[in-house]
Image (spheres, grey):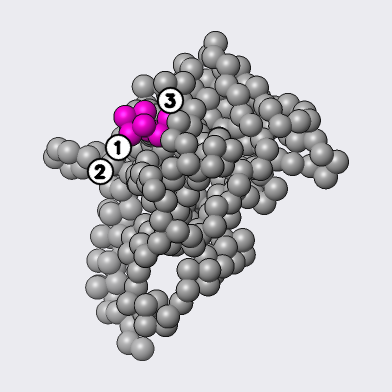
Amino acid sequence: MKLLPRRLLQAFVVCTGLLIGGSLMLVAAAKVESTPHGVHQRLLVPLPGSGAIALPIYSGTGDAVRIPGFLDGPVVSHVPDGEWTARWFCEDRVHQMTGRGELLEVHCGGTRHAFMLADAPEPAPVGPMPAKLVVISDLEGNRRFLDAALARLGVADADGNWGYGDGHLVVLGDSVDRGRDVFAVLWRLYALSQQAHAAGGAVHVVLGNHEQYVLRSNYSRAHPEHRYAMIKMGGYAEALASGTVIGDWLRAQPVALQLGRVVFVHGGISPRVVDADLTIPVLNAASRDYLTA
């Protein structure tokens, strides 16, 4: 290995020092951009001349954070003796309680929220095509859109309860990430699964790539205020851990669903999967193994 000539080495050291020094000056002049509620979301590093580089902030920090009316969670964990523990983020802090039974009531921002904790049924991933079927996709943590879509499509009634009788609802992946109300969407689908089953229908929640992200504790694509609340509650690893109501339910959902002759997946099927003649149960078993590893 040849060494750099002394003069070239000296020039390299000087240039490196200038670059580091200049970089430190730019970082020192950087500003933190926050959401309207005080959660840090980007670091704005000025460029020489004009403009700036925007770097996402993933630390879940903030200044004097208060998000009026915002409820995140709850994260509900079962304990061996039949009790459960629940924690949730409301407006500016985390709350916790322990209880028994199948109902959890949370009051946040003057609003009562009820969560049914009974196990949600798991519809078979292979079955006949139902007479009534609605398919939606990419909810991305948008509870308002979900409620509006279900009402317009006749799947839910005016009170937000299942109103589709023995019909089936297929949610075709990416129910999480980007939007702030990820847990609100998941709990909504969880409750609808219970109600649909009781009415002779079914809710099929197919996993997409973003469900895989959050189940592997990758929340780099999460809304800053949702990320802030999740970190306050211990992070996604805790919020969706084995033994949590939503975590166990989400891991049990399929990546592939077949109704009649139609196969439903989030992002298509690789030709290699087709060539390997893998069945729907085999694909779903592989997904569960991966998500529980």
For mark 3, what is the residue?
157
- Horizontal side of 289 relative to 213 (left or right) equals right
Q: Position of residue 260 (x, y in %)?
A: 40, 61
For mark 1, what is the residue?
44
Q: How crowded is mark 3: few (under 14 residues within 10 Å), some or many (20 or more)?
A: some
**Magenta-colored span:** 150-156
For mark 2, what is the residue?
53
Q: How crowded is mark 1: few (under 14 residues within 10 Å), some or many (20 or more)?
A: some
Going from the N terminus, do you reach mark 1 or mark 2 first? 1
Going from the N terminus, do you reach mark 1 or mark 3 first? 1
Q: Position of residue 68 (x, y in %)?
A: 47, 16
- CB under 8 Å between callouts 3 and 2? no
- Horizontal side of 89 relative to 43 (left or right) equals right
Residue beneath the point at 36% across and 62% down: 262
Residue beneath the point at 73% across and 26% down: 97
* Location of residue 139 by image quarter: top left
